Amino acid sequence: MNPHDEHKEGIGGMANPGRYGIERVAYWLMRLTGLGLLGYFVAHIYETSNILKGRVGWEEFLALTQTTEGHIFMTLVIGMCVFHTVNGIRVMLGHGGVGVGKPARPDYPYLPASQNARHKMGIYSAIVLAAVAMMYGMAVMFGE
Amino acid sequence: MRESHIMKIHYGTALAAIGLVAVHILMRLTQGFAESLEYESVIANYRFLPYAGLLEIILILLSIHGFNGLRVILLELKQGQTYEKAVSYGCIAAMIALIAYGSRTIFMTNMGLM
């Protein structure tokens, strides 16, 4: 018997981003960016509610976000947003049967047809587009 | 509600939000990022009824999508009848609270009640 049974590792083994290739990295990034964006969305709703405090309240709160740290945070939000969007479209297409290959008899070495080059390209495209959007966002925010 | 229906709503809200959030971001870029965040500019945005309506729709779409996503993540980690009900009702309550809080800002600013 294998002394190191990966099935006994529980959630830690399932979630290990270093073991199952770029698909598992995408799985993690999708969830982390989703949680990050939900946190940002809640904070954004609170931030914009400061408009009800009038000009002084709005400008005081805005000053907190118009800093170098604030711009770096917004750059991360842009990256999370773009990755989550592009990878989300890839996931939706996959769930709809687009780009997952045709059903076939499982033969050795049992490579899943759905984890093919098209979907890997989709994941890498999401990462590259997120990086490009972050650079554009930084140019806009730090350029002013 | 069946999970398959919930996932259709999850994907539908995502696709709708992509288009509407793009409009929301482009509005920031049409007049310069810093200028668009000035008090007068933000008030003018809220007073413009179609734009206020757009913000309200984005608020609803992203709240549904975001809190359903959180529910899915939490249900992946642990299962059980009590836990699943607590997570589902907790996410619905948080979603309603966020929509109510965001709507308060939109309605009050749009109607000049500040």
Image: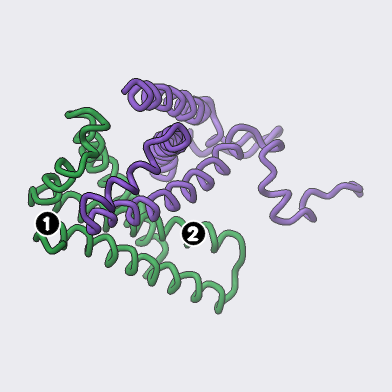
Residue B90: numbered disc: none
At mark 1, the secondary structure is helix
> Tag 1, which chain?
B
- Residue drawn at 29 percent across, 55 percent down: A50
Q: CA distance from mark 1 to mark 2?
A: 35 Å
Which chain: purple? A
- Marks 1 & 2, CB-CB < 8 Å contact: no
Kind of residue indicated by mark 1: Asn
Q: In this view, which residue lies farthest toward the front?
A: A56
Q: Is residue A93 visible?
A: no
Q: Quarter of the image holding residue A90?
A: top left
Q: Position of residue B31 (x, y in %)?
A: 17, 29
The answer to whether residue A116 is left or right of residue A51 is right
- Residue drawn at 36 percent across, 55 percent down: B65
Kind of residue indicated by mark 2: Val
Report the residue marked by disc 2: B72
